[in-house]
Image (tube, rainbow, N blue to C red):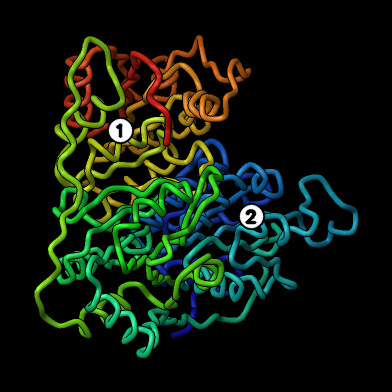
Amino acid sequence: MTNGEGSTVRDAVRSLMRAHGMTTVFGNPGSTELRFFRDWPQDFRYVLGLQESCVVAMADGYAQATGRAAFVNLHSAAGVGHALGSVFTACRNHAPLVITAGQQSRAMFPTDPYLFAQDAAQFPKPYVKWSTEPARAEDVPAAISRAYHVAMQRPRGPVFVSIPEDDWDATCEPVGIRHVADEIEPSAAALDELAHALAHAEAPALVVGASVDQDGAWELVVALAERLGAVVWASPMVGRCGFPEDHRLFAGHLPPLRQPLADRLAAHDVVFVIGAPVFTYHVHTGGRFVAPHVRLFLMTDDPDEAARAAVGTALAGSVRAGVAGLLARLGDGEPARQAGRGAVPPPVASAGLTGEYVMAAVARLMPGDAIVVEEAPTHRNALWDHLPIRRPGGFFAGASGGLGWAIAAAPGVALGAPGRTIVCIVGDGSALFGIQSLWTAAQWRLPITFVVLNNRGYAALRSFGRMLGIAGAPGHDLSGLDFSALSRGFGCDAVRVDRPDAFDTALSRGIASRAPNVIDVALAADAADLY
């Protein structure tokens, strides 16, 4: 199939975008992008974000919710600079994004003009999979085609194309519409070895990561765990859920600390890590990666994850194809008798609000098919204990540790999963990094309830301070902020609550409204230590 629509670069690129399902464009436009918008087609929609980091995070959420590459349009060097934090997160999330940025006219390059990006293709590296500024205007469509396929190849991720502003009106030849298959099963010999190890294990364990959900392998991993009787742990700092957290075999979340993680896995003789790094750590503790008797295997679609793993045997290939191959080899049999963690007792309601109570209330009151978008690091333990994720595609979090992702990604997730209720749980410090995104949610009237856990400060930093024996450090307090007023200013309904009954009422009303709304949750006290 070839692109025969029109004769300009603009027409050729739009034809490619239609063919690949990229008719939703996330952006914040400027003068170097205006020619791209000439005669804007009726079948395209433009999602405006008020700051470029928010734009990229929205596209990230949309790409993850749809499983397709999202198209991003940024403004020259300054816009790319604003967006780089979210580009880093998209890289860690393995989110397929085709990011474009305007560039000054080619004739102006020698004079280093206003808005000019020097070495534009280098700017977003190393957190894009591929980056280019085409040598000629007529090369732009081919660059977009290649960018799309690179973004969608496993491991998926962002790519970048810098486009001089006068290129859009240039003429060009048609561009072929190509399809590239990218599901590769791990080698038969490696699968045979792994199947034998799992079949003969006395106490096997699975560790699941984001790629299980991204690759549509959720049900296959459930079948594998049940076939083996293997308990299932969630990988540290996981950005998506790969296993139902109310399942009898679910053991909980591994800590991002080396020796404590090794201690959790020491009860197992064979550990199989699926679609996650080995391992993601946050604070250095020293110690072993795994106990000496543990035999570890890793299956990943990311060659870099396979290469950098500190221990174990790695299988490279698509997670879905690999797990299916394992199941075919294991056949039927009696699984080992193991059980996951017991039910965590519900939090005791008190006069004030706690993170534990909020998470339990969200689990109790949200619809069964709701999607949770989360960035509340201080309350991550409460989330894990009291808000189990039960369905594939039900949870999204940023994998980079950078703040501001969730409140911006939530509108993208809502646009990518129409009809689903979104509950965005975000800390007060995190929310302020992307608060402009409330405007986009309001403009599109998206069914998002934003739950702002208001600690009146950077409580995670306070926790780390206690861990490191540092008291009284500056820059932790956030006082004088009115989230209700801020939210209304961006067009969202908002309410402040400080009691459990008031939160229940606000959450029920917010979800029922099917409109964007903000609940400013005045918490009674800091959360406990993170780890």
Crowdedness near tag 1: few (<14), some (14–19) or many (≥20) residues, C-alpha within 10 Å? many
Left or right, 231 with respect to 27, comes to left
For mark 1, what is the residue?
Answer: 382
Left or right, 283 with respect to 293, comes to right
Left or right, 511 with respect to 35, comes to left
Q: Which residue is depicted at the point 42% across and 55% down?
A: 24
| 2 vs 1, front mark | 1
The answer to which of 226 and 518 lies nearer the viewer is 226
Residue 12 in sight here: no
The answer to which of 107 and 336 lies nearer the viewer is 336
Label 2 amino acid? Ala
| Mark 2 vs mark 1, CA separation in Å | 40 Å
The disc placed on residue 101 is: 2
Say what secondary structure mark 2 lies in.
strand
The answer to which of 500 and 37 lies nearer the viewer is 500
Label 1 amino acid? Ala
Q: Which residue is depicted at the point 28% across and 75% down?
A: 323
The C terminus lies in which quarter of the figure?
A: top left
Say what secondary structure mark 1 lies in.
helix
Expressed as whole percent of the image width and height from the top left, the position of residue 146 reads 56, 75
Q: How many marks?
A: 2
The disc placed on residue 372 is: none
